[in-house]
Image (cartoon, grey):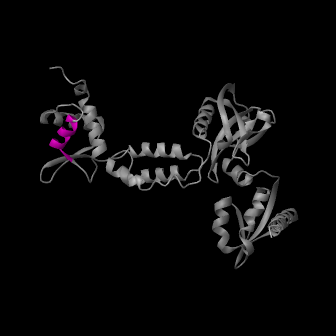
């Protein structure tokens, strides 16, 4: 009688069975393991299983035997703890740049790192469908291409688009390619950004990765090395303030003491604070002045006040008056 071709794969199927069906709360007896192997068309004798367990231990699989009252086996000490995988699942499902489809795929792969029982615990955390997600499926691969280009010291080519009111992609610059030298990927306000050197303009620029399409790695060396020798990515992000560009200005704010945490979160622990009175402190920061910045300040009402420069005060008043006018005209 011919042997089942799966018989040669017995130890691999044994490892699969133990990894998928056991953990510290769930174990299997030899008879249960033998029955499971039989479902794959594999015969196993008790002595051969003992030898296989030892071989898997030598390989690095932490197989534990416990007797209560019969001896059962389970896998302990996996590469990831369940709490760590929960963090990964949370990161995937809360990331705007990962589409719902890709989120589901990644979470299924994360679940494969634990037993079927622990995978159910991860599954109960999955609420991807209701999250705000990107509509650009290619962002996942764009990030990979950018990392490849940075590693290879190469330029990248892509097209850059905006969404119109019909949810259609409208490419910028009449569809012309962007050829830039990538130097860093950064995360801000739930979006990935590429920080790159524009060789033609001779300046550092940034691009939303989820708005980049048709990206490819070029067989051309990066430029801008001198510009990035002393480049501080964190400082650049704080200055650009949510990636809305504007002219650099030194701004002084008067804040209630309860705003200290918010200001440190936004500008960093090295931001210049000084006491103004027992209830207020003064903060001086260099930012890229924009409507986005003054709108952010308006959220805090009486708790934050612009002291200088006058141009920043005027801009806040202008933005506030425009918003008031637009909304008054709704009635």
Is any part of residue 269 visible from this angle? no
Q: Quadrant of the N terminus?
A: top left
77 on left or right of 214: left
Above or below for 237 versus 52:
below
Residue 166 on the magenta span: no
As for residue 34 lying within the magenta part, the answer is yes
Residue extent of the magenta highlight: 28-38
Residue 290's image quarter? bottom right
Residue at 65% from the left image edge and 43% from the top image edge: 210
Query: Which of 22/165 is in front?
Result: 165
**In this view of the protein, which residue sits in the foreground, 279 or 123?**
123
Return the x and y of residue 77 as percentages of the image width and height.
32, 47
Quadrant of the frame with the C terminus: bottom right
Q: Position of residue 220 (x, y in %)?
A: 69, 25
Residue at image position (59%, 53%) is 132
Q: Is residue 210 visible?
A: yes
């Amino acid at each position: 009688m011919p042997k089942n071709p799966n018989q040669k794969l017995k130890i691999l199927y044994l490892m699969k069975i133990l990894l998928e069906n056991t953990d510290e709360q769930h174990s299997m007896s030899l008879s249960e393991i033998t029955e499971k192997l039989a479902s794959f068309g594999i015969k196993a004798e008790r002595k051969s299983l003992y030898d296989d367990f030892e071989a898997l231990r030598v390989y690095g699989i932490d197989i534990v035997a416990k007797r209560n009252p019969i001896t059962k086996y389970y896998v302990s000490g996996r590469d990831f703890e369940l709490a760590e995988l929960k963090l990964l699942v949370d990161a995937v499902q809360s990331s705007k740049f990962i589409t719902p489809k890709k989120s589901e795929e990644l979470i299924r792969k994360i679940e494969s790192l634990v037993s079927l029982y622990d995978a159910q615990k991860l599954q109960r955390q999955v609420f991807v469908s209701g999250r705000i997600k990107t509509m650009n499926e290619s962002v996942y691969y764009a990030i990979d291409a950018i990392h490849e280009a940075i590693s290879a010291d190469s330029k990248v080519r892509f097209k850059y688009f905006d969404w119109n009111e019909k949810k259609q992609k409208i490419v910028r610059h009449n569809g012309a390619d962007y050829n830039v030298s990538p130097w860093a990927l950064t995360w801000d306000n739930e979006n990935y950004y590429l920080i790159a050197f524009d060789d033609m303009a001779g300046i550092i620029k940034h691009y939303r990765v989820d708005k980049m399409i048709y990206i490819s790695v070029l067989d051309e060396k990066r430029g801008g090395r001198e510009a990035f020798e002393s480049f501080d990515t964190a400082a650049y992000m704080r200055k650009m303030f949510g990636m809305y560009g504007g002219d650099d200005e030194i701004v002084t704010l008067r804040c209630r003491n309860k705003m200290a945490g918010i200001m440190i979160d936004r500008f960093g622990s090295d931001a210049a604070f000084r006491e103004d009175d027992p209830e207020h402190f003064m903060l001086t920061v260099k930012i890229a002045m924009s409507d986005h910045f003054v709108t952010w300040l308006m959220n805090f009402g009486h708790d934050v006040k612009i002291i200088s420069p006058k141009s920043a005060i005027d801009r806040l008043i202008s933005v506030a008056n425009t918003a008031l006018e637009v909304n008054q005209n709704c009635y």
